[in-house]
Image (cartoon, grey):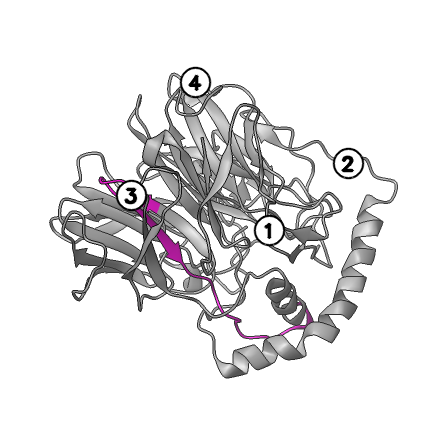
């Protein structure tokens, strides 16, 4: 799941005060939560990860006390880097960032990095207090940089030595797209377009608002241009976990939007997607694919996050059901909607927080000789044994996932699960056919070749 706290995403002095006063209280709640974790593990077999096209998804076990477990953000010591798969090398392409989340590579191989994060939202319950303090400890909330930084590797040594402030004063920028001479930004409250000149290292002009989205909740807004440049697709996540604040507040959310570039009109392309983040095209079928973070509070592997193709007009179940038409009894039901729910293509395990997504052709990286999708798994915070915290590759054949996934980068999480050195988010194929990975705890963009 993507990090979200309440419904407000700006940071104020009062918000910082809330963060500062919750530490002791959250320790008490954490002790209670740890006890709940032990009780869930006591005498129970560990569920097998729900992964693949036909996952074994355990029976849901609604949690009265939600699991709250998250490693403390530590960062990387000098000389310490993620563990790359055999035959691959990893180095820091860009450093000293402030919560880098998303990457876009321009045609001239300049690399753009969106730096943003949410602030503390309203605190209404004891569990809200615990979440705020936990998120602070995990470096998941704070003051957002609200900018896009450009890196250029002019000497070809695998490090972006030229650095400029490409675009600032945005509202939690995330997704980016370039069509002809127009640069598009997915801010949390909508899509903004800017004039762009090839090779420019900075944008100075005023943007034009093309679409409005409700901010808050799941705040990220990924963007993907269509192959013909006529449309832009945007992921907009839900406000809440299972619409516990009512469906009216969720109107227009948990969906992928389609924006017509020429007319400026936008519409919901697909719905029932709790938090669709990364977007990518599969070139054989020309279908749109996404990774989705599913709901919390039903168990370590229930339901799994997933990778799926996206059909126009398709409904994928949220909040009424999951993995096809498995009903979530916690939610007031709509039988007609459940009957139309589509089953995703490929399960990624419970609560892996799969966010980043890009297509990687065969042979891009040594030893990866088939086409497939690269996925940045940000990592769980709400299961008894943590999951994710890695970058994986899902092989494809004939336009569909084909076989088990493979690790590309691991080592982001300490073996005892107490600290995280980093948390991978956005992924993109960069200069020299190397994979770039945004790490928002390490404040690094990693380069894998």
- Distance in Å between CA atoms under marks 4 and 1: 32 Å
Q: Residue 292 versus residue 102: which sits nearer the camera?
A: 102
Q: Do tag 2 and tag 3 residues touch (Cβ < 8 Å)?
A: no
Question: Helix or strand or loop: what does disc 1 sit on?
Answer: loop
Which residue is denoted by mark 2 in the rendering? 46
Q: Return the residue at label 4.
A: 370
Q: Counting other residues with Cα less than 10 Å from the Cα at mark 3, is it few (<14), some (14-19), or many (20 or more)?
A: few
Distance between the Cα atoms at labels 1 and 3? 26 Å
Circle 1 sits on which residue?
76
Earlier in the chain: of badge 4 and badge 2, it is 2
Residue visible at 64% across and 51% down in the picture: 420
**Quadrant occupied by the C terminus:** top left
Which of pointers 2 and 3 lies earlier in the amino acid sequence? Answer: 2
Which residue does the numbered mark 3 point to in the structure image?
Answer: 154
Query: In what element is the residue under mark 3?
Result: loop
For residue 405, side relative to residue 339 (left or right): right
Write the start and end of the magenta stretch as one range.
104-127
Q: Secondary structure at mark 2?
A: loop
**Res 50 → quadrant:** top right
Foreground label between 4 and 3: 3
Mark 4 or 1, nearer chain start: 1
Residue 167: x %, y % from top left = 28, 61
């Amino acid at each position: 799941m993507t990090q979200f706290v309440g419904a407000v995403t700006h940071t104020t002095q009062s918000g910082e005060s809330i963060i500062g006063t919750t530490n002791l209280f959250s320790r008490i709640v954490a002790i209670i939560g740890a006890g709940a974790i032990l009780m869930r593990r006591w005498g129970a077999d560990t569920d097998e990860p729900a992964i693949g096209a036909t996952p074994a998804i355990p029976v849901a076990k609604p949690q009265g006390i939600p699991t709250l477990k998250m490693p403390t953000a530590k960062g990387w010591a000098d000389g310490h880097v993620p563990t790359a798969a055999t035959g691959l090398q990893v180095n820091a392409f860009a450093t000293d960032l402030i919560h880098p989340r998303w990457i876009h590579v321009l045609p001239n191989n300049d690399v753009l990095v969106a730096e943003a994060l949410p602030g503390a939202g309203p605190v209404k319950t004891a569990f809200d207090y615990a979440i705020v303090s936990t998120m602070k400890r995990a470096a998941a909330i704070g003051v957002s940089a609200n900018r896009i930084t450009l890196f250029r590797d002019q000497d070809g040594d695998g490090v972006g030595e030229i650095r400029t402030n490409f675009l600032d004063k945005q509202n939690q920028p995330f997704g980016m797209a370039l069509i002809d001479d127009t640069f598009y930004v997915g801010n949390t409250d909508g899509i903004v377009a800017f004039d762009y000149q090839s090779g420019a290292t900075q944008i100075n002009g005023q943007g034009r608002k093309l679409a409005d989205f409700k901010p808050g909740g799941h705040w990220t807004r990924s963007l993907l241009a269509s192959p013909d440049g006529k449309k832009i697709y945007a992921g907009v996540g839900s406000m809440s976990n299972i619409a516990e604040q009512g469906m009216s507040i969720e109107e227009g959310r948990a969906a992928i939007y389609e924006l017509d570039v020429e007319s400026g009109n936008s519409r919901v392309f697909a719905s029932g997607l709790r938090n669709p983040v990364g977007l990518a095209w599969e070139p054989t079928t020309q279908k749109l694919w996404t990774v989705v973070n599913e709901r919390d509070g039903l168990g370590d592997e229930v339901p799994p996050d997933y990778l799926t193709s996206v059909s126009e007009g398709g409904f994928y179940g949220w909040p009424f059901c999951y993995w096809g038409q498995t009903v979530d009894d916690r939610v007031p039901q709509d039988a007609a909607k459940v009957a139309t729910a589509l089953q995703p293509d490929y399960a990624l395990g419970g609560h892996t927080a799969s966010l980043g997504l890009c297509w990687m052709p065969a042979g891009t990286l040594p030893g990866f000789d088939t086409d497939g999708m690269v996925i940045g798994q940000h990592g769980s915070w709400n299961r008894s044994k943590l999951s994710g915290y890695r970058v994986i590759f899902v092989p494809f054949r004939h336009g569909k996932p084909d076989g088990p996934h493979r690790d590309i980068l691991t080592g982001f999480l300490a073996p005892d699960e107490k600290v995280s050195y980093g948390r991978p988010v956005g992924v993109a194929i960069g200069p020299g056919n190397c994979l770039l990975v945004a790490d928002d705890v390490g404040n690094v963009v990693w380069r894998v070749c």
